[in-house]
Amino acid sequence: MCCLLVPLVVVSALSTVYGNSQAGVAIAKAAAPWLKELGRRAAEAAFAGAIEGTASAIVHEMLVTDKANAQPVSPPPKQPPQVTGPPPSISFTKNQTLEEILKSAPPLKALPVEATAARPPSVDQLLRDFRLPSQATRPAAPSGSQPQIELHPVEAFRRGYAAEFGSGRSRNPVEAEQFYRQAARQGHVFAQYSLAQLYHFGDTGVSRNDTESLRWLRAAAERGLPAAQTQLAYAYDVGEGVPPDARAAAFWYSHAAQQGDPYAQYAMAQIYYFGGVVPPNRLLEFDWLNLAVDQGHPPALAAMHWMLDAEYDEARRGNPGAQYFFGRAYEIGVRALLPQDYVAAASWYDIAARNGNRNAQLALNRLCDTGSIRCW
């Protein structure tokens, strides 16, 4: 209540001196902000005194206990908070102006630090210890690290393929290597072959590695992938990353050719043409070449065209082997080059048999037995 009496005392004093004149009203309005501030600070001082008295009583109750009985001692009766009185009264004369009255007033004392309320912590301060590191300070994953989750080989291969070729995302050969390797270790044959290709050619962030390439290429070839068998055979054929080995090349070419790989079939035709590992054999060369031609292999088609021209010239010169060859060519037929014609085949077989070719006579008998031609 004392803090509220201070402004009233001053206003009453001004009213007594100046009465209800316009000057008195103007002085009262001008002094209102200062009087309001004076009352507020007096109220804060009183409130701080009350808090201090209450806190002292609580601390006394916590510290003063009977150590023998472990029973608390009754606290002393609480004293009413000591509220400081109003500041000294302001003395002024009738002829003083408002500025002179304010100058003669005693200065306002600053409130003690203990009485000021501490600011609550900001949101940033509360979350400072729980904030995730930023992208700049976050530790980067080591390069070449394996994916943390062991995926199913099919899913790992799918993710590796998407990372390598950018299916719906940007390309990431390093991530592709990691997923391919995870699937390849679990026996996924296409992942093994893809990993071998990645190491063979190299890519952004993935260095070329012939040793790793051949390792995974052999793994895929041993699991029966024709493309891997053909590429491994080529490596042995030309000595790419391994010493040249014609037998190993022929071995892997034959496995891939039997599964229908046209490149391997063409390679087998070349093996039987040049010989070396096996004796030259025109008929087996023709058979493998014809299989590659059926799949539209361009080099095989060009080689077959040259082969037919060469054999026809020999057949016209009376070579029984070439004549038998042409009978077989007409019996089987060659795509886009020689139509299948059993009558023309029998004619060439008959000519070759008359010239002493025993195989031609057997082939002619077969055509008759199977009803391909009418025989008398």
Image (tube, rainbow, N blue to C red):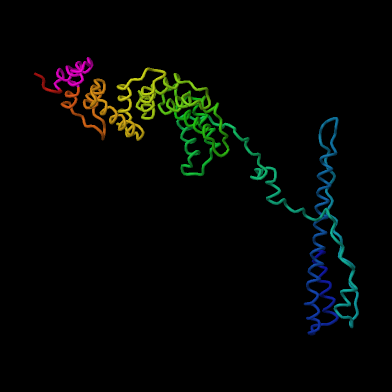
Residue at left offset 50%, top offset 30%: 196
Q: Residue 85's quadrant in the figure?
A: bottom right
Q: Residue 92's quadrant in the figure?
A: bottom right
Extreme front residue here?
317
Residue at left offset 39%, top offset 17%: 278
Residue 126: horizontal and vertical position, in percent? 69, 47
Residue 189: horizontal and vertical position, in percent? 45, 27
- Identify the image quadrant of the N terminus: bottom right
Pick the front one: 214 or 107: 214
Pick the front one: 340 or 356: 356
Residue at left offset 83%, top offset 53%: 114
Pick the front one: 182 or 132: 182
For residue 2, side relative to residue 223 (left or right): right
Residue 232: horizontal and vertical position, in percent? 46, 25
Residue at left offset 54%, top offset 27%: 212
Q: Taken as a whole, is the magenta stretch helix, strand or loop?
A: helix
Question: Would residue 353 be counted in the magenta stretch?
Answer: yes
For residue 165, side relative to residue 99 (left or right): left
Whether 2 is drawn above or below 81: the answer is below
Whether 230 is drawn above or below 16: the answer is above
- Identify the image quadrant of the C terminus: top left
Pick the front one: 306 or 249: 306
For residue 120, side relative to residue 272 (left or right): right
Question: Would residue 99 be counted in the magenta stretch?
Answer: no
Residue 237: horizontal and vertical position, in percent? 46, 25
Q: Residue 318's quadrant in the figure?
A: top left
What's the magenta region? 349-371
Extreme bottom residue here?
21
